[in-house]
Image (cartoon, rainbow, N blue to C red):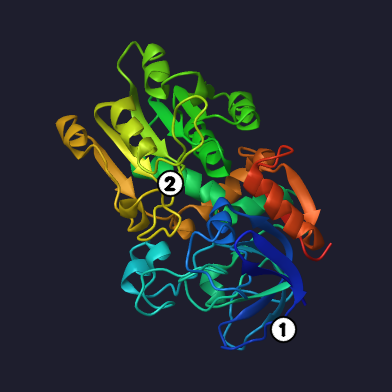
């Protein structure tokens, strides 16, 4: 079958690899109809992780079940399903508590598993014609038959729940103001989710024109950090107080927030949020931070150690929530909002391409050119 295979920094290729088969009675094999390229895939693509050549990418997957193991009871051949990027068992201590992003069964020695991602277990990615889904009764979410709302439903694998998760981490409530740093797909989903939750005012901080335009289109207030301090821009629009809540949808590859500068400053978003959010507010951090970054701008950053204004955070009595999304906690109700027409997250999808176009799509998405904001590949169309 065709699959997107990592070759080395800034290089992927579409190659023929072995089609997956049933390995356990609880497995299913899914014929992938849609699979998205995620911003976190770019961390591996850029050589910023320990990913080895040969890994098949893809953790945002939707498709049709082609084969089921003998132990699968709630699914059948022909079911249309979307899978959380988290691979989870459903029965360990963390899973039963709802923390499926931190399953301790599927990836021994590490809390959490995922498809096609470095250090997240032996699960091949779904940027391929087929993908194996373990613990399928737990991990597959059924969708309506047909192909309606495909670009909405595929986002249930990761970025829609992750954006919503940022709001949960920050405890966003109706009538509050929220600052979202990062206008990429997760940031736009965080802003969209804040509005769905009844936030009165949502700011989106970025420098990419297409992203800021998308933010404005959904009812958020765009803040271009190249035009001045985003903290000051937001305070000017909140009577000097700052926002009630903040969300970091950028992570460790944050760019310096000064006009004309092209350099990474990994802690800049965290420190900006400390200043943006009012005293006793809260900050949610769904943006990715890693314990080691070989491409970090300094020796401390390479070790995952960042200089954060902890004194100001303490002084202001701010609360922090961190960690990757537990997709199962949110995907069912978000699916139902899509079915009922209450949510249309697919507005972030900029390109829908064949799997053969993946190498070009990775390059353009990484360079943020030609309006590439979110790419969905269709391996079986």
Residue 301 shown left or right of residue 205 in the figure: left
Image quadrant where one finds the C terminus: bottom right
State the residue in front, 203 or 268: 268
Image quadrant where one finds the N terminus: bottom right
Residue 323 found in image quarter? bottom left
Taking the spot 72% from the left edge, 71% from the top edge, the residue there is: 3
State the residue in front, 34 or 6: 6
Query: Where does the image place residue 271, in percent across and percent down from the top left?
Result: 31, 35
Residue 362 found in image quarter? bottom right
Q: Which residue is mark 2?
A: 251
Task: Give the CA distance from mark 2 to mark 1.
Answer: 34 Å
Q: Helix, strand, or loop for circle 2?
A: loop
State the residue in front, 137 or 192: 192
Can residue 340 be seen here?
no
Badge 2 vs badge 1, beta-carbon distance below 8 Å: no
Can residue 366 be seen here?
yes
Query: Where does the image place residue 251, in percent across and percent down from the top left?
Result: 43, 46
Query: Could you classify mark 1 by the number of other residues whose Cα lies within 10 Å: few (under 14), some (14-19), or many (20 or more)?
Result: few
Taking the spot 41% from the left edge, 13% from the top edge, the residue there is: 237
Query: Could you classify mark 2 by the number of other residues whose Cα lies within 10 Å: few (under 14), some (14-19), or many (20 or more)?
Result: many
Q: Which residue is mark 1?
A: 18
């Amino acid at each position: 079958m065709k699959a997107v295979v990592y070759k080395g920094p800034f290089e992927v290729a579409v190659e023929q690899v072995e089609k997956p088969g049933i390995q356990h009675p609880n497995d299913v094999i899914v014929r992938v109809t849609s699979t998205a390229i995620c911003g976190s895939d770019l961390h591996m693509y850029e050589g910023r992780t320990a990913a080895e050549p040969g890994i098949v990418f893809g953790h945002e997957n939707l498709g049709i079940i082609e084969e089921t193991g003998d132990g699968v009871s709630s699914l059948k051949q022909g079911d249309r399903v979307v899978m959380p990027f988290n691979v989870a068992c459903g029965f360990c201590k963390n899973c039963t508590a709802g923390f499926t992003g931190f399953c301790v069964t599927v990836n021994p020695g590490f809390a959490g598993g995922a498809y096609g991602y470095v250090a997240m277990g032996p699960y091949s990615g779904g940027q391929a014609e087929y993908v194996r889904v373990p613990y399928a009764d737990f991990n597959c979410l059924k969708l309506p038959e047909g192909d309606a709302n495909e670009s909405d439903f595929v986002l249930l694998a990761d970025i829609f729940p992750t954006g919503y998760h940022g709001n949960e981490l920050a405890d966003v409530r109706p009538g509050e103001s929220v600052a979202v740093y990062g206008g990429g797909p997760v940031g736009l989903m965080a802003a969209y989710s804040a509005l769905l939750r009844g936030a009165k005012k949502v700011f989106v901080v970025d420098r990419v024109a297409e992203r800021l335009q998308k933010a404005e289109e959904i009812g958020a207030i765009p803040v271009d950090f190249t035009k001045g301090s985003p903290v000051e821009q937001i305070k000017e629009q909140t009577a000097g107080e700052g926002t009630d809540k903040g969300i970091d949808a950028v992570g460790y590859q944050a760019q310096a927030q000064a006009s004309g500068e092209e350099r990474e400053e990994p802690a800049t978003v965290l420190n900006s949020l400390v200043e943006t959010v009012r005293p006793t507010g809260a900050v949610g951090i769904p943006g990715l931070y890693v314990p080691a970054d070989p491409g970090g701008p300094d020796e401390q950053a390479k070790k995952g150690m960042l200089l954060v204004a902890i004194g100001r955070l303490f002084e202001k009595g701010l609360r922090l929530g961190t960690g990757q999304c537990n997709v199962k906690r949110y995907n069912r109700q978000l699916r139902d909002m899509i079915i009922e027409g209450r949510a249309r997250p697919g507005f972030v999808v900029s390109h829908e391409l064949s799997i053969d176009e993946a190498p070009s799509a990775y390059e353009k998405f990484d360079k943020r050119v030609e309006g590439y904001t979110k790419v969905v590949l269709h391996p079986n169309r």
